[in-house]
Every structure is written in structure tokens, then in C-alpha cells.
Image (cartoon, rainbow, N blue to C red):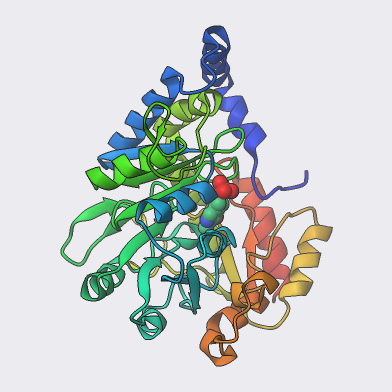
Amino acid sequence: MKKIHMVDLQSQYQKIKETVDQSIQEVLNSSAYINGPQVKEFQAGLESYLDVKHVIPCANGTDALQIAMMGLGLQPGDEVITADFTFAATVEVIALLQLTPVLVDVEANTFNIDIDALKKAITPKTKAIVPVHLFGQVANMDAIMEIAKEHNLFVIEDNAQAIGANYTSKDGTKKKAGTIGNVGTTSFFPSKNLGCYGDGGAIFTNDDDLAHTIRGIVNHGMYKRYYHDVVGVNSRLDSMQAAVLKIKLPLLDSYCNARRNAAKFYNKAFSNNANIITPTTSSCNQVCEHCDCHVFHQYTLQITNGKRDELHQHLLDNGIANAIYYPVPLHKQKAYVDIRYKEEDFKVTNQLIDTVISLPMHTELDEEQLVFITKTINDFLK
Ligand SMILES: *Cc1c(COP(=O)(O)O)cnc(C)c1O
């Protein structure tokens, strides 16, 4: 069997090559490389897809988080609570803006921010919560929004891994991930669920004033040309990337479904293996036919018999790519250590780093590959 990769961007591209190439050619023909019509078109398309009033495209998902925090007017010393188990970008921008990151533990079953830990971390200095919809699954937004309301906190959803996921509230209302809090951010990094062919990102909000503020910030703090009212940044989605994204956006739901189908196959294949915990989806506790709260940016197992590292190597030896997301919790990263953190407050992340393993997950996985991957794992972890 040919080597199986974590993602297969080439096969996906081959299926849409003609339309993508033509879309990129249009940018080349017009030479409108910055703020070309493709950017507006994609922005409008995404607003409609997400059912959100404002999408502000920007250069990448890390910028999106930073700009969202700048837009909310967070000030040095303000405390911002986020999950200990996430990609570093989330905490990086908090620190960069001289805000105080407050990392908290996650839930063992969903990998998302733990609600009790979040409540415990709130102080009079807390100004915002950044839930990360990790691996494609929406965090417990009902609880988070309730806490935010009670303590008057902003909610910034880091939606880099869950674009396209739906969240159904207790009252039955359904919203797209990233449109529930004050502001949501995403990344169009090539391997993300909606990826471009370079860097890209976006910020979304239903708040007109915040959208206005953010549109100025992404453009050097300008609200009128050459008048700089606030300190801004230069963060743009270029026309080439928008030209790719506008072709891929209508395919996002089918891409999410392809990922869910692969997840379903994995779940079923591992269901009788006592050494494996398959991912839980919070609303239905299984990958069911109609579940749409999880878009499986990653498919992540927990290996309970202590053989995670051996499995990692065994899969590599068999040509099956796999990854440890994430090998070190943020509170143990040199850049983010803080004397206030106590190890007993991070029981779950400290355990996850030794047990998690992410398997190949993308839109082009076929049955032959899935059979080979699951058989190799089940044979090894008998
Ligand atoms: C990818 C990612 C980011 C950063 O996105 P970039 O476009 O690479 O800057 C932020 N947060 C999370 C959770 C991510 O997975």
C-alpha cells in the first residue's frame, strides 16, 4: 500500500483543478492582487454560509485572534482564559498584546475547555474567554455564554479547526461555530477544513460597531484614507487565496461530510478495542448519521494501555502517517510557564499528552486506506 498521509491536498486539488485554475487565472489577468473582487465575493459568500452579519478577511488565523482581541479593546493586564490543550497561537496573541493568559484544563472526552475549571479561573481582572473548538468539535457554548453573561466577559471563539460545524443550543436554536460569541476567528491554512493555497484567515461578528473597528484595525488603523485613528496592523487575505476559497466554500459541507464518514468508519472499527477510546461528540455521544457538531479537523484517539508511542512508531513503519496533537501542554511550554499554575489543576491535559494520537483525516480517504489503517491498529493493540 502507498504511504498514507495525514492530509491529501493534491488529490483534493485534482478534483477541482479546472475551476480553481481558472479562478486564479482571473486574478492574474486583472492584476488586482490585493483587495480584488474575489475577496469581496468570498467575504459575502462566507457571511451567507455562516449566517453572520460581518466577515472580515485577514492574513491568517493567528492575526484573526490578535485583531479580534484588539477590536474588543482589551488592555494590558486584562486576564483572558483559554484552554491548556490547544495550538499555541491562541495563547501567543494573548501574551503578545500584554494581556494575561490564564490557562485551564480541558474535558477528557471532548478535549474542549472544562467548564468547572473555567469558572474557578475567573477573577475581577478576567475580561474574556477564548474557547477553542478543538479538532473540529464545538465547545460547550451554552455554558460558556451563560458564564460570560453572568461575569460580563467577552467570548472570542477560536474556530480555526471547526468551520462548518453547527451548534445546537439547549433551546433548539442552531448556529454555526464561530458565530455564537462576540466574535469568531478562523484560519484558511491549507490543511484546515476550508484551506487555501497559502495563508489566510477571517474574523466574524454580528456586532456592527465591532466589525467597523476591526475593518480599520486590519488596515493600519485607517477609517479614512491616510488618517490613522488607532494603532492597527496590515493583515489582508490576498486575491489569489480568495480566488481559491470562493471555489472551495460551496464544497465545505461535502468536505465536512467526507470527514464525518471517515470518522464513522474509524469509530466502528475501534468500537470493540478495549485499549482505544474513540472521540466523543458532546451532543450525541457517538458519530451518528445526522451529527453535525463535529467536523473532524482531526480524528484523535486515546490509547489507554500505555503503548501510544509504540503505536506511533508502528504506524510510521507501516507507511501510515500519524501525529501527536499536542505533545506538550501550553502551561509547560517555556514561553508560557507561570508560577500561578499548579500541576494538579491540569490533570486531564497532563494525561492527554501521553495518550492521544491523531490518525490520517481528510476528504480523500478511501475504504481501502481506512481498512488498512484500522486493521494495522487493531492488530497491534489486541
Ligand atoms: C491553525 C490554528 C490557528 C492559527 O492559524 P494560522 O492561520 O496558522 O495562523 C489558531 N488556532 C488554532 C486552534 C489553530 O488550529
Q: Is residue 52 above or below residue 24?
A: below
Identify which residue, 242 or 280, lies in the foreground: 242
Above or below for 348 versus 321: below
| In-front residue for pair 376/123 | 123
| Left or right placement of residue 74 versus residue 3 in this view | left
State the residue lying farthest toward the top: 29
Counting from the top left corner in percent of width and height, residue 18 is at 56, 16
Q: Where is residue 16 drawn, in percent x and y?
A: 54, 24
Picture quadrant where residue 169 is located: bottom left
**Is residue 253 in view from this perspective?**
no
Left or right: where 309 falls relative to 271: right
Residue at point 54% right, 87% down?
A: 340
Return the x and y of residue 341 as percentages of the image width and height: 56, 86
Residue 228 position (above or below residue 346): above
The answer to whether residue 96 is left or right of residue 379 is left
The picture quadrant where one finds residue 274 is bottom right
